[in-house]
Amino acid sequence: MYFFIITTQGTLKSMKKIIVFFGVASSLLFWGYAYAHQPNIVTQSPVLVSDPEISKAFYDTLQGSPRMYVIESKEDFEFYAGLLVPKEDTAEKFSAHISRIDEETRVASLDGDADEWEVIYEPFGADWYLKGPEFGTRVPAGTYAISVFNEKNEGKYVLAIGGEEKFGFMETLRATWLLPKLKIDFFGKSAISIFISPIGIVGSIVFLAIMFGIWKIIFVLAARYVGRDEAGKFEKNTGKKDRIVRLILGGTLFIGGTAFWNIPVLIFGTFVLYEAFTGWCGLYALMGKNTCAAE
């Protein structure tokens, strides 16, 4: 019983450290997204926009027809909308009509052909855009529609809605998941390119922190019940050759999983890398195998 109490107390102390570690990691992630737009990949039409004052960026590709966005608000709100296109896609310019549906009136028109498109750099995602026409004013409560189009109704664009930049915890996690997909599907780049941006750097640190926390939980529990030598110290169970193989395999899986944004491969590669650096394998511990002794 005494051994159980001491063991449980030790495990709880380790868990508290892990929780604190997660707290610091989450703070880093919030800092990275504090001044960014909430990214959204458009998959349907019409797009229903909630909380219209919260800044969102809708990434879309027109395929033969305009895209409709609908905003329904029971209160007066600050209406902002602006059009952007990836700098590489300079051939297509976009326009938009903003209407109030419940009164069948035109609120504004964003004329992409008449507007001077400005080259801008978005530092948090490290991407270049052409910024086109925009509209902003306070409007009364009602139902509004934004129709985005161009002459051929083809090409990639970004519609920014809302001016208040705000991120909650779930939005932060969602953005971390979507940004690599945007690099691949929208910008035609490898997801690895996100690591040159502040968001990518912070996001990768937090991802590794989360993976380390999960591995640490496994490590702590395993250290309590398996893998200890007679002196009570934690026992490494992978030899030098084993660790080199894990280092090469884990690095390959980590880079490949990141480049193609394959989460299972990325996670597995991370765990293999941890095994290479720590010299301990959970599977070996369960099997009672130790390749250190063989060497």
Image: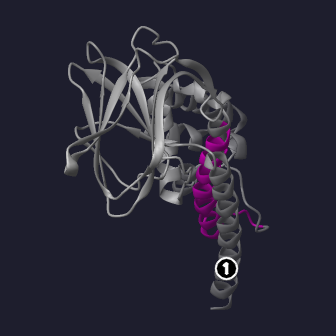
Secondary structure found at label 1: helix
Q: Is 260 colored magenta in this rendering?
A: no
Which sits in the foreground, 233 or 148? 148
- Give amino acid for label 1: Thr
State which quadrant residue 276 falls in.
top right
Q: Number of labelled discs?
A: 1
Q: Residues within 10 Å of mark 1 (few under 14, many from 20)?
A: some
Instruction: List the single residue furthest toward the bottom.
Output: 1
Is residue 257 toward the left or the right of residue 234 in the image?
left
Which sits in the foreground, 86 or 21? 86
Which sits in the foreground, 211 or 234? 211
Q: Residue at x 41, y 40 (%)?
A: 40
- Quarter of the N terminus within the rendering: bottom right
Is residue 241 toward the left or the right of residue 284 in the image?
right
- Residue at mark 1: 7
- How far across and how far down the image is residue 65, in percent? 20, 23
Is residue 127 toward the left or the right of residue 98 in the image?
right
User: In this rendering, is residue 97 above or below 51?
Assistant: above
The answer to whether residue 261 of the structure is visible from this angle is: no
- How far across and how far down the image is residue 141, in percent? 34, 59
Q: Residue at x 24, y 38 (%)?
A: 44
Instruction: List the single residue furthest toward the right.
Output: 231
Q: Residue at x 75, y 66 (%)?
A: 230
- How far across and how far down the image is residue 205, in percent? 67, 44
Question: What segment carries the magenta color?
Answer: 201-230
Is residue 111 toward the left or the right of residue 63 in the image?
right
Instruction: List the single residue furthest toward the top.
Output: 91
Q: Main secondary structure of the magenta part?
A: helix
Q: Is 215 colored magenta in this rendering?
A: yes
- How far across and how far down the image is residue 129, in percent? 54, 22
- Quarter of the C terminus within the rendering: top right
